[in-house]
Structure formats: C-alpha cells, structure tokens
Amino acid sequence: MTEPHDHDHSHSHSHEPLDPVALRAEALESILIERGWLKSAQVDDVIARYNDRVGPMNGARVVARAWRDAQFREHLLADGTDAICSFGFDGAQVEKLVVVENTDKVHNMVVCTLCSCYPWAVLGLPPKWYKEPEYRSRAVREPRALLGDLGVQLNSEIEVRVWDSSAEVRYMVLPQPPAGALPEDEQELAELVSRDSMIGVALL
Amino acid sequence: MTQRAPSRQSPHDVGGKPGYGAPKVDPAAPVFAARWEAAVFAMMRCLGAQGVMKNTDQFRHAVERVDARAYYAHGYYGRWLGGLETLLLEADALKRDALDDRVGDFARQLGASEAEVAELVAEHNVASRPRSAQAERLSASLNAGSSVRYLAAPGLYEIGQQVRTCELAELSAATSDIRHTRLPEYATGVVGEVVAWHRGWVLPDTNAHGDGEQPCHLYTVRFTAQALYGDSAEASVQVHLDLFEPYLSATV
C-alpha cells in the first residue's frame, strides 16, 4: 500500500505503482471478453462462489458430523467421496476424497509439492502460504520443524503422516475435537473447526 | 539414501529442497487478493470451454514451463496467467503483440510513461522452455472433467507390497524435452510400501503431451522419512504419495 501523498509537486511517477501481472491479466481478460469467450459476470461468479459457497465451512460441516455420528465417521474414513455426497456441496466436484484421521498417536498433514492441489470441494481455494515454496518444500522434508514454525508442537511419540497430493486424489484431515464440552448443535460444532486444522497445520 | 542426479530445470518440483524458511501466514488474507486473480481463475475455465486448454495435465505442464523467476515472483495466479498465455500462444489463438499492445494501452490510461510501458511488456511470464514436439496431437478429452478410467486388467501391485520408484530420466527416455510428470524428484529411486489402490486413472505424463490417456493403476505409496532422507530425516515421519503404476517396479 502506498501512503497518500501530496501530488502538487512535480514527479515523474504521478500514478500508483503498476503491477505488471495485474495489468497483463486485465489486458487478457479484456481481449477474451471482446471475443465473447468470457463474460465479466463469470469473474463475479468465481468470486462469489469461492467466498460464499465453496470454502472451509463445507469441510467444517463434514467434520462436525463425523464427531457427532460414529457411523458417518466410519463411512467418511472408508469412502470420503461417497460420504460427502449427502451434503450436496455447490457444484464442487471431487473425483476422489480421502479423509485421514488425527488421533492421540497420529498427526496427518496435507501438501502438494508439485503445484498446489487442494480439496476444493470441502475447503475451497487454498491459502497463499499453501502455494508458496516454503510450505511445499518443507512439508515433506521436515514436517515437525515446519509445524513448529506454524505453532504446532507435537510430542515426539506422535507419528507424523504427510500426504503429498501427487495425483487427482484429494486429502482432508479429520482433526481431533477440542477438549471440553462440545455444543450439541451441529452448526455450532462446525464453527469450532478451522480451515488449518483440516489441512493438518493446526490443532483445535 | 540414494545419491541423486543433478536437478532438472523445474522450479515447480520443490518438495524436499533445502533453503526455505517459515511460511508467511496471513490469517486475514482474502480468497482472492485482487479481482484480477479471480479473472485468471475464470479465464482458465473459459479456455477449457473454448478447447484451447485440452486437459488439466496440459495446463499444469504449461504452468511448470513458465519463466523460472516468474513462477514464484508472480505468485500462484500469476503463474497460472503465464500458463494460460503460453497455451494461447502455442495454440496460435493469441498474438503476443496484441496482448502487449493492450497492456500498453491500459498502462498509458493509468499514466505510465513510454519507458514504463516498454518495461511492462518486457516482463516475461510465458514458457521459457519449449513444449514437447507431440503437443499438436492434443485433442480435447471425451471425458473432460474426470480422469478416472475403468481398467479391466488387474494392477501389478498389492497393498502391503514393497515397490521402488524410478528415476526421472527413465520417464523421459528417448527425448531431450522436459516432460510433465507427477513423480516428484525427492521421491525418485526409493523403496516404499503400497498402502492403497485407487483403480484406473489417466496418466498425466502422456496426457499432457497429446500422447493419449494411457490409463493405468494408481497407488498410494508410503515412504519412511529415513528411506527418503537417510540419517538427516526427522523421527517418526511417513510421507505418502499417489503414484502411477509406470513410476513403480517390484523390489526383489
């Protein structure tokens, strides 16, 4: 962000700094709109979809149900793709979803070292750090140290299982519920579930 | 631990590479930092609908070939943009000059000088490495949207079996081009255990290059950190990858 400043003085850069990537994207967008390949409304749809309808609130509902319903939990761990069908998530396709469960003995975390594959159907689009080389390189090399940097200290007796999404199978972590009494209401329960806990980089 | 051959020129294959620090986490970061990021997302979809992007594997390969500096400097949607522009140029569906001219028009409207315009259009984001020669054979998949394929033949490996991953050189034999693969370098030439079988899927290594879908069995293979990194591994860590059958061989 640039600080507001007085424009009265003579200055060779009288405009905001130009972002070359943003300009290039906007230029290409305008060309594709002129061709009739793209409509501006489709960009608005993307923004609305991934802000309001397809995001970690979906995964949180799945987790909350798994915590409350042992039979659903079993179904979810055995066949995640089938188990989430009943939620009817908005247009979010996932070819194969595998849900891995954190326990007192096992901590799971998800990465995609080659690009940034992520279970869009249940978690929406990935956060920026998930797509950057720091996370992608270290998650498979020194996951304990990486988790420590992210504020998660794991007992050395807990086995760390890293899932590198190298094909089209998508992974989500079923976190352990927070300690203490949990709300009865599934919606209230879902509000306790953070996005990062379902990637496996936070505890609840 | 296996001694590794020098890394191929692939900025995206970053798993296990040393020298990186703590991730920069911003809990308040929005889904899209700016509207143009969502526009890139929408353009990816639109190029699929127009048949310029034939399949996800071809798109990933185009993103992997963007300028190595731009790959990280331009961020996630920036490298997607480089991938889309690469696909458009290679399909002859866009002239580089036409896009540069439009960038110049927009920049001038925002008050850019001619020197700044020249700098902006010199910013390279498209492929710095050529696609493989077979790419013109690409045709839109009849099964667009799904890469699951039924295979009548059983898989070669069973759950519980030990398998060894191949070297990258074995996957790109007979060509000097850098080809798309979903076998990360850090997991080459190591022994692991098959822990899951996912039936048949399109093989990205051929599908990205127009060499057909060549569906094959997909397995989840578990590697101990010791097998991957030797004595420098963290204790009690298992790394799982989803690997296509041609990446694997049975251990004796």
Image (tube, coloured by chain):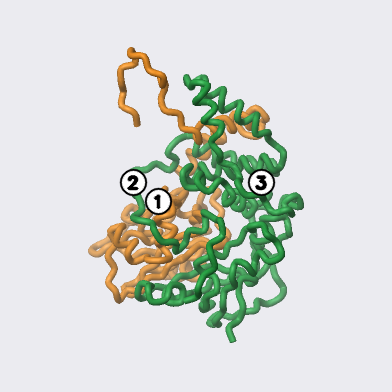
User: Label 1's element?
Assistant: helix
Q: Quadrant of residue B152?
A: bottom right
Q: Position of residue A179 (x, y in %)?
A: 25, 64
Q: Which residue is mark 1?
A: A129
Chain letter of the residue beneath label 3 in the structure image: B
Q: Name the disc covering residue B53, or none.
A: 3
Is residue A34 or residue A40 the one in the foreground?
A34
Is residue A70 or residue A21 the one in the foreground?
A21
- In the rendered image, residues at marks 1 and 3 fall on the same chain: no
Three-letter amino acid code at the position of disc 2:
Asp
Q: Which residue is mark 2?
A: B26
Residue lying at 51% horizontally and 56% vertically, measured from the top left:
A117
Is residue B5 or residue A107 the one in the foreground?
B5
Query: Looking at the image, is A133 positioned above or below residue A16?
Result: below
Three-letter amino acid code at the position of disc 3:
Met
The reply to whether the C-beta atoms of the residues labelled 1 and 3 are less than 8 Å apart is: no
**Quadrant the C terminus of chain A occupies:** bottom left
The reply to whether the C-beta atoms of the residues labelled 1 and 2 are less than 8 Å apart is: yes
Q: Quadrant of residue A144?
A: bottom left
- The span from disc 1 to disc 2 (Cα, nearest Å) is 8 Å
Q: Position of residue B9 (x, y in %)?
A: 56, 56
Within 10 Å of the Cα at label 3, are there few (<14), some (14-19), or many (20+) other Cα atoms?
Answer: many
Residue extending furthest toward the top: A8
Residue A96 visible = no
Residue lying at 59% horizontally and 80% vertically, measured from the top left:
B158
Which colour represents chain B?
green
Which colour represents chain A?
orange
